[in-house]
Image (spheres, rainbow, N blue to C red):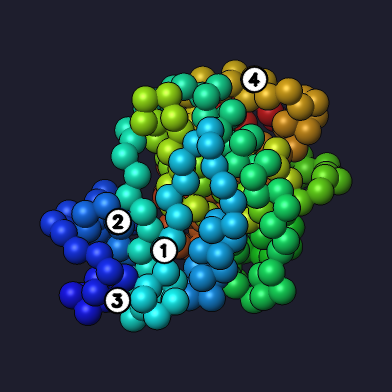
Amino acid sequence: MKEILDLFGISGKTEKLTGGQGQSIRVGDFVLKPIEETAKYSWIGEALASISTYDLAIAKPIKSKNGNFVESGYGVTQYLTGDFFIGRIEEKIKACQIINQLLKSIKIPEDWVHWSSPWQWANRIAWEEASLPDNADSKSCKIIEAIKAEYKPIDLPEQLIHSDLAGNILFNGNTPVIIDFSPEFRPSAYAEILLITDSIAWHQEKAESLWILQHPKALIMQLAVRAIVFRLAVVIIFKPKNFEALMAELKNFQPILNILM
């Protein structure tokens, strides 16, 4: 581990962090975490390095002394000070919109279709670009298909978005702090909807917060059902035979479905 830290030129007291699926370690003013997809992470590093932020802070990957974003399976990002707050949804939405604008000009990489994490797979399921696992429980599949029956076509331009903002917007005073960048190429409004639906399901936000957004109601509804299918698909991908796990997650999103279906 010391060799990796030396390559990134960092040192200091180490502290295990609760985020990053429990695998992230703070080292002084930086965060060290294992990287499974080197090419994608390196592309993220280059993409984020190209943007300047004034109204918010983004934890960006840094390069090693060798000029790499990944060394021996590990990457390093800046550690930014901030606290997570329940609520403050309008401030979070504004931060999401600022990020969308900053990322708008970044083009999709040629290798994007070849990169696939469980979350990318789940998003492709939600957008009808991929199928559920072959060994998925049949009852789980029926629930997904029942929600998908509400789908209507969406024709919106796609761009780079942060697809996991609900738990990854902190605040340092009034300044939003964005961590754990999760890239997707989807409509910008989808990032906003994911932020809200996840906040409703996991962070005690009111279901009526869906209507805060200044988008047509029909569009909000269509993006919201896709956001829910995405999160349910994640559960199925990780636990294809565990119907009870799917039902537990479905319960979290049920208040939203109650006003959509």
Q: How many marks?
A: 4
Q: Quadrant of the C terminus?
A: top right
Nearer to us of marks 4 and 2 is: 2
Q: Position of residue 73 (x, y in %)?
A: 36, 77
Q: Name the kind of residue labelled 4 in the image.
A: Ile
Task: Tell me the residue that label 2 is attached to.
Answer: 30
Task: Tell me the residue that label 3 is attached to.
Answer: 7
* Residue closer to the observer: 191 or 110: 110
For label 3, the SS is helix
Q: Which of the 4 image quarters holds residue 239? A: bottom left
Q: Is residue 9 above or below residue 150?
A: below
Q: Is residue 100 above or below residue 256?
A: below
Asked if marks 4 and 1 touch (Cβ < 8 Å), the reply is no
Q: Earlier in the sequence, mark 3 or mark 2?
A: 3
For label 1, the SS is loop
Cα distance in 3D space between marks 3 and 2: 13 Å
Q: Residues within 10 Å of mark 1 (few under 14, many from 20)?
A: many
Q: Residues within 10 Å of mark 3 (few under 14, many from 20)?
A: some
Q: Name the kind of residue labelled 2 in the image.
A: Phe
Cα distance in 3D space between marks 2 and 1: 9 Å
Q: Residue at x 58, y 29 (%)?
A: 93
Q: Name the kind of residue labelled 1 in the image.
A: Ile
Q: Name the kind of residue labelled 3 in the image.
A: Leu
Cα distance in 3D space between marks 4 and 2: 35 Å
Q: Position of residue 18 (x, y in %)?
A: 26, 49
Q: Horizontally, is 186 left or right of 66 in the view?
A: right
* Residue closer to the observer: 82 or 167: 82
Asked if marks 3 and 4 touch (Cβ < 8 Å), the reply is no
Task: Tell me the residue that label 4 is attached to.
Answer: 212
Q: Position of residue 85 (x, y in %)?
A: 37, 27
Task: Tell me the residue that label 1 is attached to.
Answer: 62
